[in-house]
Image (cartoon, rainbow, N blue to C red):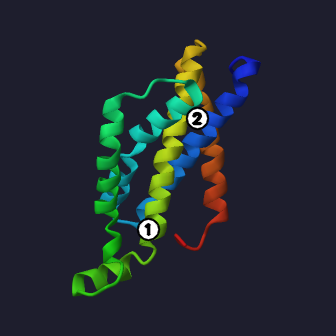
Amino acid sequence: FGSPPCQPLLLVRGALGAGAVIALNYAATLLHVADAVVVSFTMPLWGALFGRLFLDEPVSSSFLVVLPFCAMGVLLIAHPWETSGKSASLALNAQRFPHRWLGIVVALSQAALSAGAKTCVRALAKGGHHPQVILFYLSIICLAASSVVLFCIQHGPV
């Protein structure tokens, strides 16, 4: 079950991974699935930031060049300028997804949680842990967290 000094990091990796899975499913109820998935594609940027902050990994200059384009892409997907239903299609979209901003925040947090989990995996891999041990903790914590969410939330997405 992993060496005792690394068990807290294994538990954190499992909790972050479980949170990421739950957040992506929740974001898919608040947004179009395509929008939720595209916003979650910001995970590599979060991963680079977390690698720099927690593992002292270098950040390349190409990352700094790509970062503003990624932010613009998220804005294009989130399209905050279209929150009011001025046209018929926007009004229908606002009726179908009334909590769009919450969905964008949840999708961005899913990307950050996923990047945090992958940062933990990189830290654990440096310690020579077997990949099956790392996945075992993810599976057990996902099972427990999903069970709690399943039995506690029974009234829809919001």
| Residue 118: image location, x then y, percent | 50, 32
Residue that mark 2 sits on = 138
105 w.r.t. 142: above or below? below
Q: Is residue 135 visible?
A: no
73 w.r.t. 155: above or below? above
Q: SS of the residue at dot 2?
A: helix
| Residue 32: image location, x then y, percent | 34, 65
**Could you tell me the amino acid type at mark 1?**
Leu
| First reached walking from the N terminus: tag 1 or tag 2 | 1
Q: Residues within 10 Å of mark 1 (few under 14, many from 20)?
A: many
Q: Which residue is painted at 34% across and 30% down in the image?
A: 61
Q: Is residue 152 left or right of residue 158?
A: right
Residue 111's label in the rendered image is none
**Could you tell me the amino acid type at mark 2?**
Leu
| Residue 23: image location, x then y, percent | 51, 54
Q: Residues within 10 Å of mark 2 (few under 14, many from 20)?
A: many
Q: SS of the residue at dot 1?
A: helix
137 w.r.t. 102: above or below? above
Q: Quadrant of the N terminus?
A: top right
Q: Which residue is painted at 67% across and 29% down in the image?
A: 9
Q: Is residue 71 left or right of residue 111?
A: left
Residue that mark 1 sits on = 30
Residue nearest the viewer, comparing 128 with 119: 119
